[in-house]
Image (cartoon, helix red, strand yellow):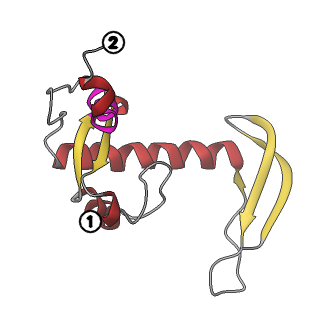
Amino acid sequence: MAVERKTGTCKHHGETEYRRYKRRNSNSWHCWQCVKCMKFRHMKNQQRKKAKLIAYFGGKCIKCGYDKYQGALCFHHRDPATKEFSFGGSQRNFEKLLVEAKKCDLLCQNCHYETHHEDFCNDTSQ
């Protein structure tokens, strides 16, 4: 992907790097954008998609019921062999994320850790 860079002044971030990217299958370019603003928009979009997925799956950990902070909830693949991609940083559209999430259980971080380390967590000899 072709990228052009320059320095410019953003109304939110002051003097910063700007980038524009060549459009796929075209000779035209996207408009110049502040890199920090692009990252912020991407993060917000990711948060919106995650919130929508969490709501779709009941909004809480299926093991313990935790529901206080969506950042502490994650999607655990029931069968790792069916996993096509990880959710972290994924730029896929919501429909593709939903298809993948249907292969998962919604867990809080503690229950997710325990699921991956059941042998250790169930060992009472220590």
Examine the rendered structure and indicate whether residue 118 appears above or below residue 54: above
Callout 1 crowding tier (Cα within 10 Å): few <14, some 14–19, many ≥20: few
**What residue do we see at 46% from left, 43% from top?**
44
**In the foreground, 90 or 13:** 90
- Give the alpha-carbon distance from disc 1 to disc 2, as whole Å: 41 Å
Q: Nearer the viewer, mark 1 or mark 2?
A: 2
Q: Where is residue 59 in the image (x, y as percent from the top left)?
A: 18, 37
**In the foreground, 21 or 93:** 93
Q: Mark 1 or mark 2: name the one nearer the start of the chain.
A: 1
Q: What residue type is labelled 2?
A: Gln
Q: Which mark is residue 30?
A: none
Q: Position of residue 122 (x, y in %)?
A: 24, 24
| Disc 1, SS | helix
Is 115 in the magenta?
yes
Please state if 16 lies on the left or on the right of 74 as rendered: right
Q: Where is residue 49 in the image (x, y as percent from the top left)?
A: 35, 50
Is 114 in the magenta?
yes
Q: Name the residue under label 2.
A: 126
**What residue do we see at 15% from left, 26% from top?**
64
**In the foreground, 76 or 72:** 76
Q: What residue type is labelled 1?
A: Val
Q: Quadrant of the N terminus?
A: bottom right
| Disc 2, SS | loop
Examine the rendered structure and indicate whether residue 36 appears above or below residue 1: above
Q: In which quarter of the image is the C terminus?
A: top left
Please state if 10 lies on the left or on the right of 75 as rendered: right
Quarter of the image for residue 54 reads: top left
Q: Name the residue under label 1.
A: 99
Callout 2 crowding tier (Cα within 10 Å): few <14, some 14–19, many ≥20: few
- From which residue to which does the magenta span run? 108-117
Please state if 31 lies on the left or on the right of 43 as rendered: right
